[in-house]
Image: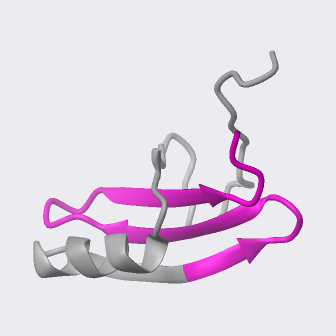
Amino acid sequence: EEGGIGGGFNPVDENNPAGSVLPYVQTDDIEASLKQAEKLGAKPLLPKTEIPGVGWFGIFMDPSGNRVGLYTSMNPR
């Protein structure tokens, strides 16, 4: 559906074990969001990284050990 929820599946490996879920949150500024998360006790796991032709993402681990992804689209609507 145009403009609907997006998503994908990562291959199962040591960083993505079977049964794990990695939610993504949309942000306009991944670097600022990662810095704010770190100030609040999160551990950055992956800096802003480009998905060619699609957008950018970054990942951090919250203080409880949950991984959270951040996403910014190259083509915001």
Q: Is residue 60 magenta?
A: yes
Residue at 68% across, 37% down = 7
Q: Position of residue 55 (x, y in %)?
A: 73, 62
**Colour option used:** one colour
Q: Which residues are magenta?
A: 48-77
Residue positioned 46% across, 71% down in the render: 30
Q: Is residue 31 left or right of residue 62?
A: right
- Horizontal side of residue 56 vs 74, given as left or right: left
In the figure, residue 77 lies in which quadrant? top right
Question: Which x, y percent locates residue 11?
Answer: 74, 55
46, 72: nearer the viewer: 72
**Is 76 on the left-hand or right-hand side of 26?**
right
72 horizontally vs 27: left or right: right
The stretch drawn in magenta includes residue 53: yes
Q: Residue furthest right?
A: 53
Q: Nearer the viewer, residue 31 or 14?
A: 31
Q: Is residue 28 above or below residue 48?
A: above
Decide whether the magenta segment is chiefly helix, strand or loop: strand
Give residue 75's position: percent from left, percent from top: 77, 52
